[in-house]
Amino acid sequence: MAEIYYITTNGTLRRDENTIMFENGEIKKKIPIENTSELFIVAEVSTNTKFFSLLSQNGIVAHFFNYYGYYIGSFYPREGNPSGHVLIKQVEHYLDKEKRLYLAKSFVLGSIINSEKLYQIDASEHLEKLKQASSIQEVMQVEGSFRKLCYKALEELTGWEFETRTKRPPQNPLNALISFGNSLVYAKVLGEIYHTPLNSTVSYLHEPSEKRHSLCLDVAEVFKPILTEGLILELIRSGTITENDFLEETEYCYLNLDGRRKFLRAFDNLLKSTVYYPKLKRKVSIRTLIRLELYKLVKHLTENEPYIPLNYHSLKE
């Protein structure tokens, strides 16, 4: 599988014949186009239309983050695997109340089962409320209530102050880690959606009008406990990231350059790590798990094969 490249240094990205060239006053480096699947640009860069044309020709998605390390948006080439049939089925499942509710509940169920073992908490009450929920609003309320429980557990396990969830802007290091990690997960899921017949704008838990690529928000619910919160626990417990890896301004906290690089390195290593996947009878990377989850959704929409969210911890046992 082609590589994900992370740009963490300010500079210029341009097309150099049939490859990508990154350069600034100190660095000049070629990024081989044939071995590139995605770009995560976590720096201030300048570029031009020739660069984007090269990405489009090769089906490469590029994700952009601002000075503070938070997601701005993605360059999403024309769909590589468009399917009118899948789009019609996606819309049908959105318009049908019961079909939409099933998928919305499934994404939250995935979030709960992948968080429950991570935090060693009892989620039975939330699972029952999720089962009884009769509207998208009620499903969102269950998700929000359960997430508060998880954040409290995260605070206790790390010993870092959390207080309450603050996003725009995050106001302490733990909130900053969650925001940065979740942004990476949203972008990564979007990058995988590009390689499937799914339309990224049709979603079920989140309203399609909420964000342009709202389907990635839905699927990310299943993977945030693995790729954000699980990773945060590992980085803090191991001492890889400390409170020295943050910059704090008035009512704003964010990872500094070293902190972002540490997180990105660990994020990439986690994506490349493998688990045994029983259905395929072989080991697959976490990155591949995301794409497999998306194809499970495709089969649910088109072949009436019920979508069952990933239980990550069962794969490791």
Image (spheres, rainbow, N blue to C red):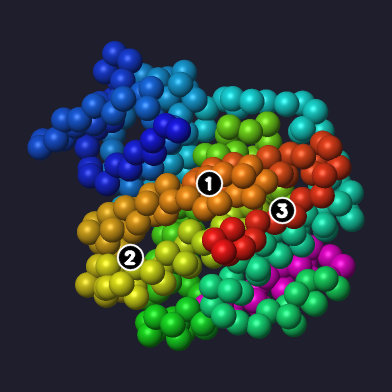
Of mark 2 and mark 3, the one earlier in the sequence is 3
Q: Residues within 10 Å of mark 1 (few under 14, many from 20)?
A: some
**Which label belongs to residue 207?**
3
Q: Amino acid at mark 1?
A: Lys
Q: Judging from the image, what secondary structure is the residue with disc 2 in?
A: strand
Q: Is residue 18 left or right of residue 258?
A: right
Q: Quadrant of residue 145?
A: bottom right
Vertical placement of residue 203 versus 231, above or below: above
Q: Judging from the image, what secondary structure is the residue with disc 1 in?
A: strand
**Which residue carries the number 2 mark?**
254
Q: CA distance from mark 1 to mark 2?
A: 35 Å
| Whether residue 122 is visible | yes
Q: Position of residue 277 (x, y in %)?
A: 60, 49
Q: Amino acid at mark 3?
A: Glu
Q: Position of residue 36 (x, y in %)?
A: 39, 30
Vertical placement of residue 77 versus 299, above or below: above
Q: Identify the residue shown where x is 87% and y is 68%.
A: 134
**Which label belongs to residue 283?**
1
| Magenta part of the chain | 133-151
